[in-house]
Image (spheres, grey):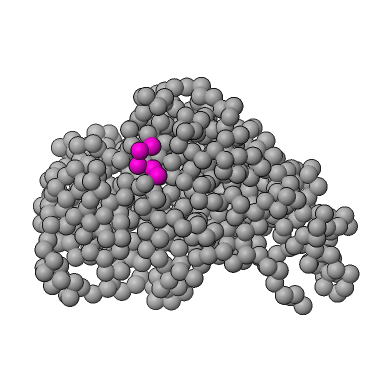
Amino acid sequence: MRKLRSHAWFGGLDKDGFIHRSWMKNQGHPDEMFDGRPVIGICNTASDLTPCNTHFRGLVEHVKRGVYEAGGFPVEFPVFSCGESNLRPTAMLFRNLASMDVEEAIRGNPIDGVVLLAGCDKTTPALLMGAASCDLPTILLSGGPMLNGHYRGRTIGSGTDVWKLSEDVRAGVITLGEFMAAENAMSRSPGHCMTMGTASTMASMAEALGVTLSENAAYPAVDARRARLAHLTGRRAVQMVVDDLRLSKILTPAAFANAIRVNGAIGGSTNAVVHLLAIAGRIGVDLTLEDWDRLGRDVPCLLDLMPSGRFLMEDFCYAGGLPALMSRIADLLDLDALTVSGQTVGQNIAAAQVFDDEVIRPRDRPLAAQGGIAVLRGNLAPGGAIIKPSAATPELMQHRGRAVVFEDIDDYKRRVDDPALAIDPSSVMVLKNCGPKGYPGMAEVGNMALPKKLLQQGIRDMVRISDARMSGTAFGTVVLHTAPEAAAGGPIALVRDGDLIELDVAGRRLHLAVDEAELTRRRAAWAAPEPAMGSGYQKLYVDHVLQADRGADLDFLVGCRGAAVPRESH
């Protein structure tokens, strides 16, 4: 076999080779581990502060077994773990930081191939972004979703039912005690959100992109088949090094087109938009918002899964998982796209079967005729904004209403439940300064809770517009990722109370009905908000972050820098 990258560390018979081998041997590794066999780096995002990923400490052992079995040398290394449920001000602020950690750890160490252990929302894109900038043979393993939540005789889903139950408490439909009782019934096993939130979406995107083995997305975290898949992933990583099957051979334009179409068919999270744009930017694929609209627009949503539908990821698994769903839209996919299995997408899904037509619906009975992400443009969003039609109220998809404006998230929290707030069900709620620079980090606050006085009237949805994101578990007629953002001087910064806003999803239009002369006067009076922090990583982020329509990556991280062996350390 050819000399691998790790040979530059472990292959020398000089002082440097001595240092690299000797210090590694304090872990008990025998001489033959340094004989030129593939060194497989296992990038592990396990952390007690990332509940979705805590079980990776056990899962990684199955990966290592597979690596050893195939004749490789597994080396586990930790990276920054972006835990969605605990990390403030938002995990998205640190996605790019984690990707830098991954990239530099891979490039700076004796690694020939990589296994990425990802689960919680931002860990999947962060790991793929960092690995794409190195372009070594790389395979991803998701941690899997939690088991279904069960509460008082009904199934509840992570995130989705939190939003619903919270609104019910504020509306006086349920008691605070009932709300708190659900807390212990929702997250009842290891794993990530079992709704089609961002974690499940990105696990599905990774499988659709071809960077995981088949059936990666849906096996529950505690299912023995997840551990079996980990074993097979470790084994496969070694062969990928032998075959020099690099990420750039997998992450092609065809792979991204497949992922966008699959996202429509699963009713996937709007967060997939910024993440796939960022991953594409790292590997050198020209992917745009227009591609999202063009490729996903007419894809039917076939997966009846929260938040768009009724079921959860455990049900999706038993119904056949992602291969089964992909088989139902096979005519829309590029079946010749190569995957990490060494086979094509077509070969991977050839034997797939659907076992439950209620969960994975037939083409003639979709959950929504158009499941893709809709990209809106207009004078309010010249850089684009997005909405998830499958999670919106059909009657609000074409709407004209007067703006009720919140200058930032603190202003919203202060005033939203004020009985004197001048708002009615036809109003359009507008939230500013929550984008990449403004929050900072573009937090998941776009699905604003409705005013209590409207909830008490039975209102459960209104048009909401922001430069923020929303959780993949959330729902509603919510326009997101408005670009440019308010903190960058985008038109959303100029919206005032009472302005008329027109939303036309079918026409892909988002219009602020204010004449240009008035907008010019407002723009002259506008001043950029002071950043929350004037130094440290937050300053680096705010100074260099790209807008949402470009994936919100840092400008200096875009592109593939490869994994050339750095100069010696001694």
- Quadrant location of the N terminus? bottom right
Q: How many marks?
A: 0
- Quadrant location of the C terminus? bottom right
Residue 222 x/y as whole percent: 59, 35
| Residue 468 seen in the figure | yes
Residue 312 x/y as whole percent: 44, 32
In the picture, measured across the screen, residue 465 lies left or right of residue 501, that is right
The quadrant where residue 304 appears: top left
Residue 432 within the segment the image draws in magenta: no
| Residue 156 seen in the figure | no
Q: Nearer the viewer, residue 304 or 350?
A: 350
In the picture, measured across the screen, residue 363 lies left or right of residue 127, that is left
Q: Is residue 502 above or below residue 267?
A: below
Q: Residue at x 51, y 24 (%)?
A: 354
Q: Is residue 376 above or below residue 17?
A: above
Q: Nearer the viewer, residue 290 or 420?
A: 290
Residue 568 x/y as whole percent: 75, 75
- What residue range appears in magenta? 295-299
The quadrant where residue 498 appears: bottom left
Q: Residue at x 40, y 60 (%)?
A: 550
Q: Main secondary structure of the magenta part?
A: loop
Q: Residue at x 54, y 33 (%)?
A: 323
